[in-house]
């Protein structure tokens, strides 16, 4: 799967997990921030995304991971982390 295909797949997962009705997966920019500016997600959204990733890709995103700020910074970062860790 190419990087852009994985990013679109992860974007669709985010849209579905968070029930985002005002945005489609293709509208999420790979380098745009997911939190605060950008999509404006919050910590509860991060938990929802982490649960959806766990269910779909078979690995846990831990809340105490010191790299979470980087992992969840953009769609591209999150997609790359999934690609490296999926089972």
Image (cartoon, helix red, strand yellow):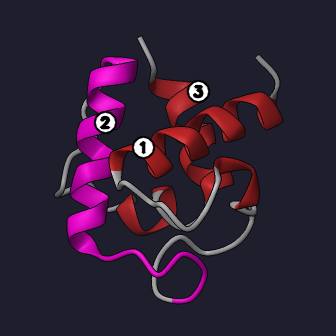
Disc 2 packing (10 Å; few <14; some 14–19; many ≥20)? some
Q: Does the magenta stretch include residue 42?
A: yes
* Residue 72: mark: none
Q: Where is residue 24 in the image (x, y as percent from the top left)?
A: 64, 54
Which SS type dominates the magenta stretch?
Answer: helix
Q: Is residue 50 above or below residue 40?
A: above
What residue is disc 3 on? 83
Q: Where is residue 19 in the image (x, y as percent from the top left)?
A: 37, 54
What residue is disc 2 on? 52
What residue is disc 1 on? 16
SS at mark 3 in the image: helix
Q: In this view, does 4 lie to the left or right of 87?
A: right
Q: Nearer the viewer, mark 2 or mark 1?
A: 1
Circle nearer the N terminus (1, 3): 1
Q: Nearer the viewer, mark 3 or mark 2?
A: 2
Q: Is residue 5 above or below residue 65?
A: above
Q: How many labels does the image show?
A: 3
From which residue to which does the magenta span run? Answer: 37-58
Circle nearer the N terminus (3, 2): 2
* Residue at image point 75% right, 63% down: 29
CB within 8 Å, label 2 to label 1: yes
């Amino acid at each position: 799967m190419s990087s852009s295909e994985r990013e679109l797949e992860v974007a669709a997962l985010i849209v579905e997990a968070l029930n985002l009705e005002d945005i489609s997966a293709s509208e999420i920019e790979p380098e745009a921030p997911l939190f605060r500016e950008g999509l404006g997600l919050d910590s509860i959204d991060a938990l929802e995304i982490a649960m959806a990733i766990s269910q779909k890709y078979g690995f846990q995103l831990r809340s105490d991971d010191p790299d979470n700020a980087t992992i969840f910074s953009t769609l591209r970062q999150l997609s790359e982390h999934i690609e490296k860790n999926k089972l």
